[in-house]
Amino acid sequence: MLLRAAAAIYLVLGDLGVGALLAFFALVTVGLVVWQERRSGRAIDALRSRAAPPIGSALRWKSNSENANPSHCAFVKWVIGFCAASISNRMAARRASSAA
């Protein structure tokens, strides 16, 4: 924005060559920013698509496969339940200590 304003001032006040050069470099800079934003967006989308699936879908896949190990699924479910209970117990303890 500032480069475009400076280029406009140069063009209005008289130095046509410097104003045109500044306008050209301003356009190149904006083009590079847009190009880089598109590349970054595509990279983020690719990373999101390659991210690990949610645990629930992994458990469904594991339990539906021909080599499913029910004890493994039970263990993973137990770990998830234990962590959830531990977190809720900590939250309840914090609420009780802050209320006292």
Image: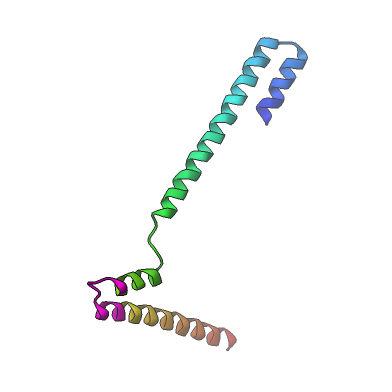
Q: In the rendered view of the protein, which quadrant contains the N terminus?
A: top right
Viewer-side residue, 95 vs 28: 28
Residue positioned 71% across, 26% down in the render: 5
Picture quadrant where residue 96 is located: bottom right
Q: Is residue 73 left or right of residue 20?
A: left
Q: Is residue 89 left or right of residue 5?
A: left
Residue positioned 29% across, 80% down in the render: 75
Viewer-side residue, 49 vs 86: 49
Residue furthest to the right in view is 12
Residue 85 vertical position relative to residue 51 in the rendered view, above or below: below
Specify start and end residues of the magenta stretch as a single range.
64-75
Picture quadrant where residue 95 is located: bottom right
Picture quadrant where residue 34 is located: top right
Residue furthest to the left in view is 67
Residue positioned 51% across, 85% down in the render: 92
Q: In the rendered view of the protein, which quadrant contains the C terminus?
A: bottom right
Q: Is residue 11 left or right of residue 39?
A: right
Residue 19 vertical position relative to residue 100 in the rendered view, above or below: above
Residue 62, position as x, y percentages in the image: 30, 71
Residue 66, position as x, y percentages in the image: 24, 72
Q: Is residue 20 magenta?
A: no
Q: How is the image coloured?
A: rainbow
The tally of labels here is 0
Residue positioned 59% across, 87% down in the render: 99
Residue 76 vertical position relative to residue 44 in the rendered view, above or below: below
Viewer-side residue, 93 vs 14: 14
